[in-house]
Amino acid sequence: MHPTAHIAAIGTAVPDHDIHQAFIGWARTRLPDERAARVFDRMAGRAAIGHRWSVLPRGADGGSPVDPGGFYARDLLPGTAERMRLYAEAAPVLSIAAIEALRAQVALDGITHFVVASCTGFVAPGIDQIIAAQIGLAPSVERLLVGFMGCYAAVAALRSARHIVRSDPHARVLVLCVELSTLHLQDNPALEPLLAMLQFGDGAAAALVTAEPVGLALGQPFATTLPDSAGLIRWDITDRGFAMHLSGEVPARIAAGLADPAFAAAATGGRDPSEIDGWAVHAGGRSILDAVESALHLQQGVLAASRGVLADFGNMSSATLMFVLARLLGGPPIHDGVALAFGPGLAAEGFGFRSAA
């Protein structure tokens, strides 16, 4: 019998610089005509995002990164090298803040494995090594870096932790997701990419996964892919940062996929949606949450944790799902839950979970 892996607790952290309204104002000035601006205003107003937080420093007069003296206050936006230098500095700081928030809930002694997910930066030695050294993990700790998987990378990271604990009941796995999406603002005058960029913020979340029966028990993982959808969600590495392509077709394609019983079964691990009492859906955007809710005929309010995270933080890529799970950990007991995230592919990945007995 394999032991059951559990998420004992989750610690989260965001920077203290709210850039949401400033970035909206900056993006609006990039639109070529008033008609596009009116559409932009309507869509931005419907995004259901109140705040997005950034590691980018304030400008010379305390303004946002797009104000005079800010990181993006120039005719030609910073190159990839400059953005990666800031990633190498800021990602460990934000990560350690999340780890300390986790440490305030559970003891982090005896860590045997360290799994890190991030798709918004590259550095070598990796941030897993940098963070491990800074928090004093033993050199013998086994590390795994999950890179460039996008929004469902939290599933891959927690799935890997589950496999580790099932193979070694004494393992104590520290799982970290850290994303600095605001490092990749693009000066693109097209409506769709501007709206896509205004979904994303920075955040980090850390979890402890062990065989100890506390927190959330991790069940069977699952994964599937929508056919002919590879181009709908894409990251392109350019000389001016990572250019995010998030097609406006994504919500409709997810809804159409979930309307297919076979895809819906694959995307929920074979569970009947009416019997699921805990939903942790990646808060990729209001329209994506609406599509999941409508296609699976979910009762209004069951995605409250996801919508709350979206409103307070925006889409933090891989860290987002962990923020949602953190909210569910603090709520009523869950007997049969589903964690579900969408990302490049267009793939749907997730796992079942329940409150520990």
Image (tube, rainbow, N blue to C red):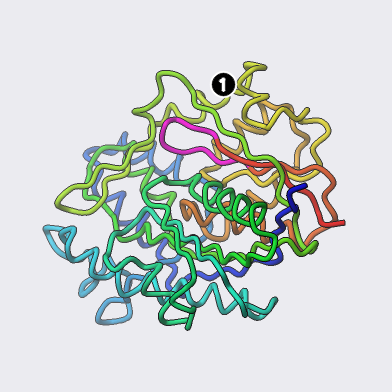
Can residue 77 be seen here? The reply is yes
Residue type (three-letter) at the residue carrying disc 1? Gly
Q: Which residues are magenta?
A: 340-348
Q: Position of residue 154 (x, y in %)?
A: 53, 51
User: Is the C terminus in the top left, top right, bottom left or bottom right quadrant?
Assistant: bottom right
Where residue 254 sits in the image (x, y, percent)? 54, 27
Main SS class of the magenta portion in the image:
strand
Of residue 339 and residue 13, the one placed in the foreground of this image is 339
**Residue, disc 1:** 257
Q: Is 114 drawn above or below residue 336 in the view shown?
A: below
Q: Is residue 326 left or right of residue 311?
A: right
Q: Residue at x 75, y 30 (%)?
A: 271
Q: Position of residue 316 (x, y in %)?
A: 47, 55
To which quarter of the image does residue 267 belong? top right
45 part of magenta stretch? no
Q: Report how many numbered discs are placed on residues in the image.
A: 1
